[in-house]
Image: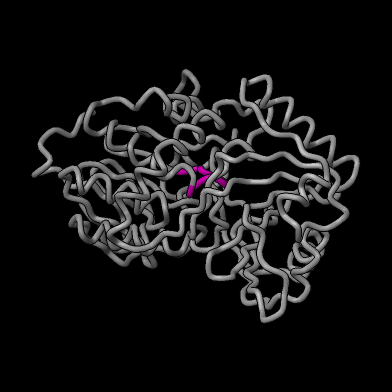
Amino acid sequence: MVVEDMRDERVAVVGGGVIGLSVAWRLAESGYPVVLIDPSPTRGASWVAGGMLAPVTESWPGEEDVLALGAESLTQWPGFAQQLQPFGEIGLRTEGTLALALDSADVGTLDVLADHLHNLGREVDRLTGRQVRALEPTVGPKVRSGISVPGDLAVDNRNLLLALRQAAIGAGVQFVAERATAVRPGMVELGESFMDCSVAVIAAGAWSTGLHPALESVTRPVKGEILRLRTRHGTLPLPTRTIRAHVESRPVYLVPRADGELVLGATQHEVGYDEDVTVGGVRDLLSDAEQVLPGIAEYALTECAAGLRAGSKDNLPLIGWLEPGVLAATGHHRNGLLLAPATAAAVLAILRDGAAPDYARAADPSRFRTTQGRTR
């Protein structure tokens, strides 16, 4: 399906997180009449994200397609950020990422990652604990080894969302502050009412699951808790790089901001649509992070929050047609911020050219369909 006469073909984007806003902006600036449907655009999981743009340190054996898509999107990020510059400072950081290990099991996990990347032809710098502390002096003595990934980026997710909203408004996107309840060809249901459209793009993150039958068994909410800390007078400074660590096999990340803020996350729980912040989650995050950066014990704790990521069955997003007139751009799990440029470009290509770019072919939702048309 190619949407050719853009003047008469309205596209409804359902979801106002980083993916929905990016898709709406790209389509509108390319001439499509776009309406974005979300009761609270810029909120949701994107608002409580860490801001890492780190496909290499997120990679794992068996998820080569995820790495390839993430790596492609990372190459699009500098241009994406530059185009957003007139709409707000998004805090893009280029210092890179350190992946760290504390005990012997964590070192083994890091070795698996390093070997996996080496086998894919992606070189990484292996570091001893002493070399890690030479780069980041505030890293604690329990850290035994690390990997330096200088090409990874990070962004201030909240500034990014606000800039995307302004960019979308500037491009002519119409915002409708309602919650979609279902998406069908030519129609988005809004409770008791509905909205006509030529194409609907489902980009509602974890809430996409209930909007179309094809998403019910292949996407799911994955809860993540996140904390925000802030330096105080006399405390040790923030690290300059994003830090990802394993502490007794539990993952933890620490993302510095230019204004003295440190974003700390994130737990992962399969608990449906529960968005409560738990005492245990806060305790574990602070305890693990303090082993990596002992100085945070003197920081101020300014926010505790939880968000629902949109998980998929294979950790690869769904980007493509669910049926004629209904596109999916969801299931990005931990990589929504990273994959925003590539996803938006892919949706535009699908509508304008009739096919996704090569880099997005593996993310086609058809991979979950059987010959009888049901999902597997």
Q: Nearer the viewer, residue 165 or 207?
A: 165
Task: Tell me which corner region of the image, top left, top right, bottom left or bottom right, holds residue 144.
Answer: top right
Q: Main secondary structure of the magenta part?
A: helix
Q: Nearer the viewer, residue 255 or 282?
A: 255
The correct choice, above or below, for 141 with respect to 317 in the image is below
Q: How many marks?
A: 0
Task: Name the residue at 77% across, 61% down.
Answer: 293
The correct choice, above or below, for 58 with respect to 282 in the image is above
**Residue 334 painted magenta:** yes
Task: Tell me which corner region of the image, top left, top right, bottom left or bottom right, holds residue 360.
Answer: top left
Measured from the top left, where is residue 153 in percent x and y? 53, 47
Task: Tell me which corner region of the image, top left, top right, bottom left or bottom right, holds residue 101.
Answer: top right
Q: Residue furthest bottom?
A: 233
Measured from the top left, where is residue 32 in percent x and y? 17, 45
**Residue 254 painted magenta:** no
The correct choice, above or below, for 300 with respect to 10 in the image is below
Q: Which residues are magenta?
A: 330-337
Measured from the top left, where is residue 140 in percent x and y? 82, 58
Left/right placement of residue 204 relative to residue 55 reads: left
Task: Name the residue at 39% across, 42% down.
Answer: 341
Left/right placement of residue 114 relative to residue 196 reads: right
Q: Quadrant of the N terminus?
A: top left
Q: Residue furthest front?
A: 134
Task: Name the residue at 67% across, 81% down.
Answer: 233
Coloration of the structure image = one colour
Q: Quadrant of the C terminus?
A: top right
Q: Nearer the viewer, residue 62 or 236?
A: 236
